[in-house]
Image (cartoon, rainbow, N blue to C red):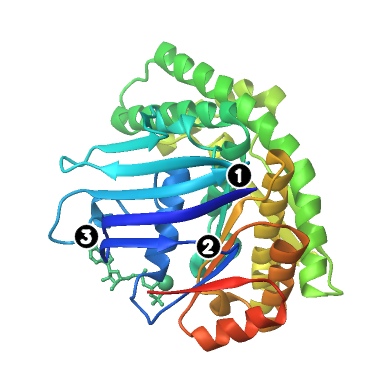
Amino acid sequence: MFRIKHISLFQFRNYHQSHFDLTERIAAICGPNGSGKTNLLDAIHFLCFTKGYFNKTDAQSVEQGTAGFNITGQFETKGTALPVSVILRENNKKELWVEKEMVTPFSNHIGKLPLVFIAPDDIILITGASEERRRNMDTILSQTDHEYLVQLIRYNKCLLDRNKYLKNLDGSMPDEILLDGFDDQLAKSGIILLKKRISFLEGFLPKVKELYAYISSEKEEISLFPSFSTLPENYLQDLHRNRSRDIYLQRTAIGIHKDDIEVTMKANPFKQMASQGQKKSLLFAIKLAEFEWLKQYFGFPPILLLDDIFEKLDQERLLKLLDWVGVKNDGQVIMTDTHASRIKACLDEISLPYQLITT
Ligand SMILES: Nc1ncnc2c1ncn2[C@@H]1O[C@H](COP(=O)(O)OP(=O)(O)OP(=O)(O)O)[C@@H](O)[C@H]1O
Ligand SMILES: [Mg+2]
């Protein structure tokens, strides 16, 4: 059993000082627009990942007119209490405390508290650029494979340095020995990451396909396959072979930062072919596969945060989701909606105890 039981917020966005007890496994957070529902979910994300789910800087999360914030959560794993705090000091330095010990680096904490977040804008995972799909894949893998996260940090740092170097060259003679050094490091981390992605996607993509069929009750089959710019065995040669082009383009065109997942329906790109509802179903299938993946790895279900549930799902699909996570699994679900009556009607259909929290 893995739960968050209590959360305290201090100077976090619209919360000056607030406390919430999560007494039931299923919690519905209700309140009008702008009342802090998403902020409360994001605070839980902070505790699990040391950062928010949305692209906001830490400074933007401090209550306006104040300095610093404190988010403290009481988790419970296998019957043991686990207090976690994320503190932003007045000088903008962030600290993570777990069981009264300060944790550094933060990457050591990733994967300790598994979480799946579904927010309205997540549809960009389907419709958006490849970067979104890589980010999602990285989030999953970083939670289950610490080495993946370590290599990813290394890779991204090296890629940034190499690209900066290429940009600054601006027509002058490149230092081939320096570039060899960049390429060796990129290939070293890149090969490890690529191998891990290949083996992850081999298990993950069939799961997504299967869940898509379950959710959408579609007759239309979809196909999902990875798209890589190189393979582990060719990685370094491909970097070398592409060097003059990279110098010309002033960026690195080969590597795992180009990976993508392609989806087709009736041999056409899913993005262009699918209806709104089908896109939502696919998003939902990916997130459920993520949930399943984490559950299998950890041996218990991750916490599921569902923001603005009716924005994304009709009642039928929502009931399927709740049945999956709430009835078939004993995971904690925290969801938000503007209308208490609507969420109540839905939760009353599945006979599970739940709690209403008003913001
Ligand atoms: N740094 C901050 N300081 C003070 N208030 C903030 C800060 N950042 C965001 N807010 C406020 O938080 C509110 C938004 O909260 P949130 O997004 O959680 O609302 P919500 O309940 O999810 O609304 P909706 O139903 O529209 O999604 C806004 O009123 C915004 O002004
Ligand atoms: Mg919101």
- According to the picture, the residue beneath numbered tag 3 turns out to be 63
Identify the residue shown where x is 47% and y is 26%: 154
Q: Quadrant of the C terminus?
A: bottom left
Q: Which of the two discs, 3 and 1, sits closer to the camera?
A: 3
Q: Secondary structure at mark 3?
A: loop
| The quarter of the picture showing ligand 2 | bottom left
Residue 264 point in image, percent of width and height: 75, 62
Report if the beta carbon of the residue with label 3 is closer than 8 angstroms to ligand 1: yes
Residue density around tag 3, few if under 14, some if 14–19, many if 20 or more, within 10 Å: some
Q: Is residue 54 visible?
A: no
**Above or below for 104 versus 90:** above
Of 11 and 17, which appears nearest the observer? 17
Q: Residue at (39%, 32%) from the top-left corner?
A: 160
Q: Amino acid at mark 3?
A: Glu
Q: Amino acid at mark 1?
A: Ile
The mark found on residue 140 in the picture is 1
Q: Which residue is mark 2?
A: 23
